[in-house]
Image: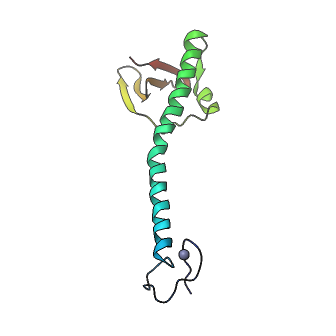
Amino acid sequence: MKKCNTCRNEIPKSRKSTATHCSDACYYTAKKARSKRRYATIKAPDTEIKRCEHILAHLFEVSTTLKKSVNIHDLETYKFNFGISTGEHKDEKKGICKIVGKYAYYIHPDKNLTIWKLK
Ligand SMILES: [Zn+2]
């Protein structure tokens, strides 16, 4: 006997053989949950970009105000997401610099980091 995906009750034989829910109510509950999840996944990258932009903003302050050098380990400490960027900038000498919101960063071969604030 097949079970309802929402409430785990048995699906009555009166429902279609392909039915995954015991009633229309359960079907719509599941559908609503699905669209909510979809909304959450669209929303996620935006907050993730904000979070990473914040990390760059902080390290930018550290490197400019405190004149401390920052490196890739500082990013890792803050669990920076290297997979995201809002754009790329190709520097003549350095190569590809990644942009996250108002900040751009470049990782040197020695793992040191240069961060710029974009205007
Ligand atoms: Zn059900």
Q: Residue at x 44, y 86 (%)?
A: 17
| Residue sitting at the far bottom | 13
Decide if residue 72 is on the left or right side of residue 86: right
Q: Residue at x 59, y 20 (%)?
A: 70
Decide if residue 87 is on the left or right side of residue 27: left
Quadrant of image for the N terminus: bottom right
Of residue 56 and residue 45, the one placed in the foreground of this image is: 45
Q: Which of the 4 image quadrants contains residue 119?
A: top left
Question: Percent from the top left, x then y, of residue 36?
Answer: 48, 55
Decide if residue 72 is on the left or right side of residue 33: right
Label total for image: 0
- Residue 47 vs 103, above or below: the answer is below
| Residue sitting at the far front | 25
Question: Percent from the top left, x then y, of residue 81?
Answer: 53, 37
Q: Residue at x 45, y 18 (%)?
A: 117
Q: Residue at x 49, y 89 (%)?
A: 13
Of residue 50 and residue 36, the one placed in the foreground of this image is: 36
Colour mapping used in the image? rainbow
Question: Percent from the top left, x then y, of residue 111?
Answer: 56, 26
- Residue 13 vs 91, above or below: the answer is below
Dividing the image into four quarters, tell me where ligand 1 lies. bottom right
Question: Percent from the top left, x then y, of residue 59?
Answer: 57, 21
